[in-house]
Amino acid sequence: MKPTTRPAPDATPGPPADPPSDQAGEGRGRTGFRLPRPAAGPAPTAALLAAAVTVLVFCAADAVARSYPFGPRTRNVNDLGNQYVPFHAHLWDLLHGRADGGLLVNWQSGFGSSFLPDLGTYLSSPFALLVAVFPRDEIDLAVYVITVLKTASAGAAMAWLLFALRPGRWWAAGLLGASYALCGWSVAMAAYNPMWLDGLIALPLLCLVGEWALSGRRPVLGALVVALAWIANFYTAYMATLGAGLVLLLRLWLSELPRRRRLAAAGRAGLTTALGIGLSAPLVTVVYFGTRHAYPGRVRQFRPVPTEDLLARLLPTTYSFSSPAVYVGTTALLLALALPFHRAVPRRVRTGWTLLVAAVTLSMQWGPTHLVWHAFATPQGSAYRQAFVLCALLVIAAWTSLSYGPPDRRALGAAAGLLALIMAGASGSEIARRPFTLPIALLAALAALAGLALLGRTDGGRRTDGGRRTALAGLAVALLLGGQFGEATATSAVATRLRLAHMDDYAPWGARQQRQSEAIAGADDWPRYRTEPGREQTVGNDPLEVGGQGAQYYSSLTSDVLSRMLTALGDGWTSRGRNLQSLDNAVTDAVFSVGARVHSPPDPHQNWFPQDGSRTTVSRQDAAPLVTVRPSTARTHGRTDVSAFGPSPYRNQELLLGTRVYTVPRLTVRTGAGKTPDRSDDARPGLRLGALPAGSAARQPTITARCPAGSVVYLWAPYFSGTARLAGDPAHGPTGRFRSDHPVTKIASMQRLGTVPASGRLRIDLSPDRTSLVPDGAVGCLDTARLRTAVERLRTTGATEVTVSDGTVRARLPAGSKGTAVVAAPRIAGWRCATGDAAAVPAREYHGLIAVPIDGTATSLTCTFHPPGLRLGATVGGVSLLSLTLVGAFTAVRRRRAAAPSPTTRPHDSASA
C-alpha cells in the first residue's frame, strides 16, 4: 500500500482520495480485507439541514398554492380525502376508546369489515400514532403534520446514507437529502398518498442496512429496520427493498473484495432481509390474504409513456398523473449527468453508477420489469409508483460525483449539454409546454451551473487565498441553496394546484361534518341498532369520519362478498366497486338493523346538484335485531356465495327479508319526442336515453307504470346519470340524484322518489346529463304495511340480547329457536360460529350474510372473527424472532471472544503489543 503524503503548504489541493470502501486491499484487518466504518461526525448536521430545508420548502409551496393549512384551498384530493383522512380519524377513535370495533373488526364500515388488513395498508406507520395528540376536529391538520414529518425524515435518512457511502461536504449532503425528499414522486404522488412516504424513508434506511451487511455489523438492528419498513408500508417497502438490493450489488462489485467475502456479505444481507420480513409477517400476511378476498379491480395493460414525457418529468414544475415523476432538482441532475465525465472519479465507480441509473430507467419502461417493480400486478391508478427508487439513485450518483470534488469544466460542460438535450427532447411533450416551465428550468440551471462552477474554483484556489475562497464558497452555497429552494417550491406548488384542478376534492372538517357527527351521536345505540350516516355523503368513508355504522366503505381491500351483495341489492359504488355507498332503502335498513338514518343536504363543496334545504335531520324506523332467526327452509351455503341473487334488486331484497313486499310493474319508457328508446348495444342492459342539454326547454324522457296506491316508489337505474322526479306535486317526493359513467367506474344507487298517487298511475320525469340506460324492472313499489309485518316477525323471533366486542358477536336466542340464525354482517372470510357449548366451526352463508344452523337445543350464539393469514403470519414471525435472537446471541458471543485476550499470551507480550 502506498504511503500517504501531505501536499506542500503552497500546493493546490486536489479532489479527495478514493475511500478504501471503493478500492481493494485497503484497511487490512484480521481477515485480510475490512471495509472501514464511515465517520458519522457531520452526518447528524447534514440530516438536520435536509429535514429543515424539506419542511421549509413543503410549507412554502403550500403557502404559494394557497392550500390548506395556509390558504382556503383544500388539499384533500382523491383518496387522501376519501380514504386516508377518514382512516386516520378512525385510528384516533381507536386510540381514545371511541371506535365501534377494534383491531380485528371495523363495525362502522361495510356493515362489519376486517380492519387489520386496512391497518396494515393505511395506518401501520409509527408516524400515524401522532394523530392521538391532535383534537378530533383537527384530523386534517394531523394528517398534514404527519405528511411533513415523513417527508422531512426521508430527507434526513438520505443525508445520513450519503455520508455512509462516502465522506464529503455536510451541507452538500443536506441539500441532496432534501432533493430526494422533495423529488417529483414525493410532491406529486406521495404528498396525497401519505402511507407511500414510508417507502421514501425506507429506501435510504435499507441501503444503510446493506452497508452494515457489507461490513458485517449490526445484524439485529438491520433486521429490525427491515421489519419496521415492511410494517410501515409493505407495498413501497417491497420496491425500496429491490432498490436497496441493486445498490448493494453495485457496492459489492465496486469493493473488489474476494469472491468468498462478496458472497458472505450478500448472504448476510439476504438473511437480514429475510428475518426482517419474517418479523413483519403477522401484518403482511393478513394484508396479503385481505387482497385475495378483495373485490377485483380492473386489469390494466401497461403502456410506457413516450420518451419526451419521461424527459419532461426530470424538469421542475412539470406534472402529470400518468408519467414517472423523476424530478430531483437541477443541481442533483447536473451532478448525476456529470458523473460519467468526471475524471476524478475512478472509471469503475462512474461506470457502475451510470449503468445502474440507466438500467433502472429502462426497467420502468419495459413491461416485464415494470411488473416486477409492482409485485407482478399493474397498479389501478398511477403506473410509476417505483419512480422514487430512480430518484434515490440519481441523488446517490450526484453525491458520488461531488464527493470526489466538484466537476471540472469538461464534466460540467458535458452535463450542461446533456441537460440542454433533455430540455430539447422534453419540448415535444405537452407536460413541458406550460408557460412557466421552461423559464424556471433555465433559471434553475443557471443557478446550479454558477454555483458548481464557483465551488470548483474554491477547490482550485491556493491556501493563502482563504478569505476569497470562503466568499466564493459562501456565494456558491447561496446559489445552490437558493436555486433548489425556489425550483422545489415552485414544483410542489404547481403539483398541488394541478392535482386540485384534475382530481375530485373534498372539504376538510368543518360545520357540515360537525353537524353530522352530533346528529349521529344523539341517535346512536349500537349494537341494539345501527345508525346510518346517510345517503348524501361527504367523503367515501363517512362512518369512519363522522361516526355511525353503515354500508359505506372505501378501501383497496373492500371484500368481494360485500361488494357483490350490495350491488345485487341495488347499491351504488365508485372506484370500480371498491367504494360502496349508503343504500337509503327501507327494506335493506330493516335487514341490516338500521334503526336511525341521518339525512343531510348535498355537500356544497361538491356542487353536483342544487340543494333541497339545508338542515341535517334524523329519521327513525323499526328494524330487525342484529341477529335474526330464519325458518329451516332458508337456504344456506358452506362457502361465501351470492349466486342465488337474480337480476332484480327488489326480488333480491325480498330474499334477504324472507317476504314478498314489492310490486315490480311493467314499464313504458319514452324519449322526449315520445318514441320508444333503442336498446343498449353493449354489455349493460336497458333502454338508451340521450343526454338532455343543460337549460334545454325540450321535453323530458319519462317512465310510466301502475302500482298500488300509497306504496313507496323506488327507481333502480345503475347506468343512469342525472335526476329523476315523480311527476305531480314536488312536495310528494325528493329528487333522485344518480351518477354513473362509461366505461363503468361508478354506478348509481337505488333511490326513493315518493308515494304512488291514489289513481295508482305514476310518471317519473327523467333529466339525463349524459347518455344513460333504464333497465327492465327499474321501478319497484314497496308495500310498507307488509314490510312492518315482516320486521315485527323478525323482531319477535330474533335475538333478545346482542353484544359486540371487536371480533366477537354474542347473542341470546329465544328458547326452542330452530332454523338458521343470521347475523346482519357480510360473511367475509374468517368468521367462525358456535351455538351453546359446541365447538366453533366456519360460519355458513345466507345470501352473503353470516349464518349458523340451529336445532332448538341452544339459546346462545357466539361468532368470532379470525383474520385470514394471522395464524400463518404469527408462526413465521415467531420463528423469525427466535432466529434473530439466536443471531444476536451468536454475534455477541463472537464479539466477546474476539475482544478477550488469549489465555496463552504472556503479560509482557500483551503489554508490548
Image (spheres, grey):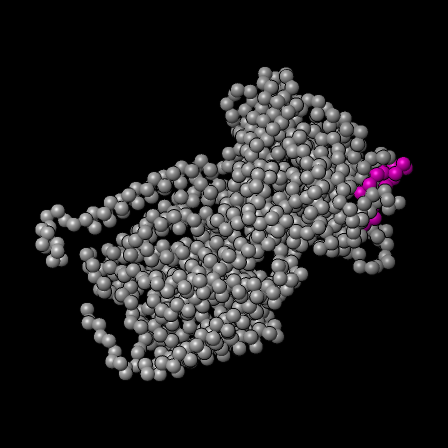
Specify the segment rendered in magenta: 753-766
| Figure check: 685 above or below 166 | above
Q: Is residue 756 magenta?
A: yes
Q: Position of residue 467 (x, y in %)?
A: 38, 81
Q: Position of residue 204 (x, y in %)?
A: 41, 58
* 814 horizontally vs 117: left or right: right
| Residue found at x 59% / y 70% | 430
Compare residues 340 and 887 and report the one nearer the observer: 887
Compare residues 144 and 883 and report the one nearer the observer: 144
* 292 horizontally vs 733: left or right: left
Q: Is residue 758 magenta?
A: yes
Residue 516 seen in render: yes
Compare residues 587 and 97 and report the one nearer the observer: 97
Q: Quadrant of the N terminus?
A: bottom left
| Figure check: 534 above or below 854 | below
Q: Quadrant of the C terminus?
A: bottom left
Q: Residue furthest right?
A: 759
Looking at the magenta stretch, what is its main secondary structure?
strand
Q: Position of residue 330 (x, y in %)?
A: 48, 72
* 807 horizontally vs 241: left or right: right
Residue 557 seen in render: no
